[in-house]
Image (cartoon, coloured by chain):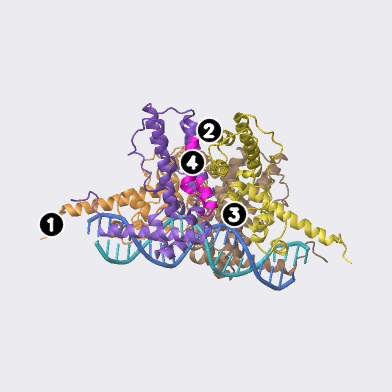
Chain colours: A yellow, B purple, C brown, D orange, E cyan, F blue
Amino acid sequence: MTQIPPITKQQQKSLATKRRIFHAAREIFQRDGYENLSIKNICAVAGVSTGSFYHHFSSKDDLLSYYIEEQPGIVTNSLAIPKTWGEAKDAIIEIYLNYVKYCRELGVAFVSNYYTPKNQSLNPVTRSKRPYPILSVRSFLEKALSDGALTLKYDLEQTLTDIRMIVIGNVFEWCLMNGATDFEGNMSRSLGIYLDGLFH
Amino acid sequence: MTQIPPITKQQQKSLATKRRIFHAAREIFQRDGYENLSIKNICAVAGVSTGSFYHHFSSKDDLLSYYIEEQPGIVTNSLAIPKTWGEAKDAIIEIYLNYVKYCRELGVAFVSNYYTPKNQSLNPVTRSKRPYPILSVRSFLEKALSDGALTLKYDLEQTLTDIRMIVIGNVFEWCLMNGATDFEGNMSRSLGIYLDGLFH
Amino acid sequence: MTQIPPITKQQQKSLATKRRIFHAAREIFQRDGYENLSIKNICAVAGVSTGSFYHHFSSKDDLLSYYIEEQPGIVTNSLAIPKTWGEAKDAIIEIYLNYVKYCRELGVAFVSNYYTPKNQSLNPVTRSKRPYPILSVRSFLEKALSDGALTLKYDLEQTLTDIRMIVIGNVFEWCLMNGATDFEGNMSRSLGIYLDGLFH
Amino acid sequence: MTQIPPITKQQQKSLATKRRIFHAAREIFQRDGYENLSIKNICAVAGVSTGSFYHHFSSKDDLLSYYIEEQPGIVTNSLAIPKTWGEAKDAIIEIYLNYVKYCRELGVAFVSNYYTPKNQSLNPVTRSKRPYPILSVRSFLEKALSDGALTLKYDLEQTLTDIRMIVIGNVFEWCLMNGATDFEGNMSRSLGIYLDGLFH
DNA sequence: TATGAATGAGTCTTCATTCAT
DNA sequence: AATGAATGAAGACTCATTCAT
């Protein structure tokens, strides 16, 4: 007979410790960036000994692997189908202003670490499990196109690629400047101009 | 015909050493990534002493900054002042197709490691010595503007930021896809549409 | 009888290591002087790893600061509040005769190396953690002043500075003479005369 | 036949270079202190190559050896014999305020390097060649004593020692504080109080 | 389960000195 | 007489990891 919740007090404590380590790592990562994320650091913040760390995680990499894929998707289903391309433009910009907000929540340090070409969890091809937030305009555009509300100068795929590139470019700029840019302003302006050129 | 800077044998040797260091760094970068790029490593591969490294480069960052500073071909001084915005658009796209070429020369592996927000040698603010190469359209646009050949919808600074972001976005996409994208196609299309929107 | 902090075997071993480092540093200091005192050196002599050093001391300066911070015997809390200025004078001199004793324990060679303006672990401003030990008469004087037992011609701070300077001057003289001075005699006389002039 | 001034142009140039190196070293030493005095530094300031340095000086130590004993003595002969102890006190303080001035001219960095117990050129016993500036009150006091203008509570030798210690203590304090003390104020106050205690 | 002492290779950088030119 | 490229040991400090308790 397997007992579903046979958690003893000891196990609970153990889990709590593991969670403390986890949260400490997340906090440091966001605040100080990857290069300042050391075991010593983590343990200090978590209030835990080094030995304890290695009891719960087999290595630093082991811990980090837990962080993959934690971001929530951006829900675009609720968006009304646009009637004019002006509406479409505004809606798209809105979506990415939401993304800007999400980036701000994560913090520059975190995002700076995350946006590395090596981070294949960003790769829209490799990536399967969840809708890539940057791709989430796809369904929106598809609906608008099939509805006849919009016509594009280019292939949908190409357009999505362009938008993705512009958005990442914006994020990158924000990271490089260590947060000292007009993130929202840049995003709406550059996207806006591009979309103007697109619908034109 | 005598060359104005008559390079002595010693200077030649010195340059060769500098180049060896340069290539060694590139090799390691491509093979092992940014985090495994250490001065010791570089020197070992280059067959050069640590002291020699610091004779040629003032720091690790100094070395890295050369990779974008030494881009060949982005000489905009020689560009003719455009008469129509169509000419301007084509010229700008041309400049960045050159950049695409340069990226291809460096290789995806290298560029993937290089384009990390953590790589502060990319930061246009931190970097003081010379103007950011990606901004090298600046002088071109300035001339065109002062000549009355062009008028921009937005501030020059903002426009340059947008272009920089779009370019970086393209590079990032190319890296993420591990080179399996239409780099040139994406670059000209996305920049083209943006510029269409800009001059409108 | 049980001691309140029941030191485990591990803690004992740890303390022993710390002491080994401490003694090694002292030995090298005496033998080779301040400029030849390196972490590597210390660790080699102590038979300890670099990591271990930094486990016990946060930096080289941290280690050095212990030499004056751990002075035995300059406990002024236990000193009775003086009733006359003669008592005060005697008490102060007594305190610094204790310091003289401590210097003798450390040895001329050590102290000679230690008392360099370059040794910033001596700087009362740089050092933040704890009050400068030579200033430990402060609390004594403060109590005496607030008690009305004493009145000073000058600001307390200035007086403390004077005393500190005289004491250091004595130590310096002793060092310069390579120990061949009447350290105790000089100390009590010079301090005595100064204090005479002070209370006068 | 030996020609007294057979200096060729080459020799002149050589001497000029040597002097440039010398002055550069002095400048850096005073401005930045001993620990920032490197061959590279010196050569940069002197506008000379490393090789040239080693052509003129066999080593860094060789260069430094030239600096010993360059300070001028303080002339006290001209001081009028005091009639009251008040006059004597003022005169003595005046002498050391001159010394303070001299220290300020040399700069904190320089003096910090100089005032080390290991620097035996400070040792009044070892030292023979010139009058030790700190000792230069001796003749003054001797005259005043033999003239009957003054009587001391203690042996002249002891008194001189005290004064020397107090002065060095002041200098040390100034060095430790990196110049951020009221050097003149401390000097006159501490010496003044001591002398009050002495003549009482 | 948890502690924290210990390890030692690794980080970047500085520096006095040598030597071919 | 002068240059400057090259050396390599040494500097303080960091860090992931192991292990006895």
Q: Label 1 sits on what residue type? A: Gln
User: Left or right of B120: which side holds D79?
Assistant: left
Where is mark 1, residue-wise?
D3
User: Left or right of B153: which side holds A56?
Assistant: right
Q: Label 4 sits on what residue type? A: Arg
**Numbered disc in front, either 1 or 3:** 3
Query: Residue A129: horizontal and vertical position, in percent?
Result: 68, 52
Q: Label 2 sits on what residue type? A: Ile
- Height in image: B128 above or below C115? above
The magenta stretch is B170-194
Instruction: Give the CA separation, mark 3 to mark 2.
Output: 29 Å
Where is mark 2, residue-wise?
A193
Query: Residue D127: horizontal and vertical position, in percent?
Result: 39, 57
**Numbered disc in front, either 2 or 1:** 2
Q: Nearer the viewer, residue C196 or A134?
A: A134
Where is mark 4, residue-wise?
B189
Q: Secondary structure at mark 1?
A: loop
Tag 3 and tag 2, C-beta contact below 8 Å = no
Q: Are marks 3 and 2 on the same chain?
A: yes
- For this orientation, the residue located farthest to the right is A1
The chain containing the residue under callout 3 comes to A
Q: Residues within 10 Å of mark 4 (few under 14, many from 20)?
A: some
Q: Label 3 sits on what residue type? A: Gln
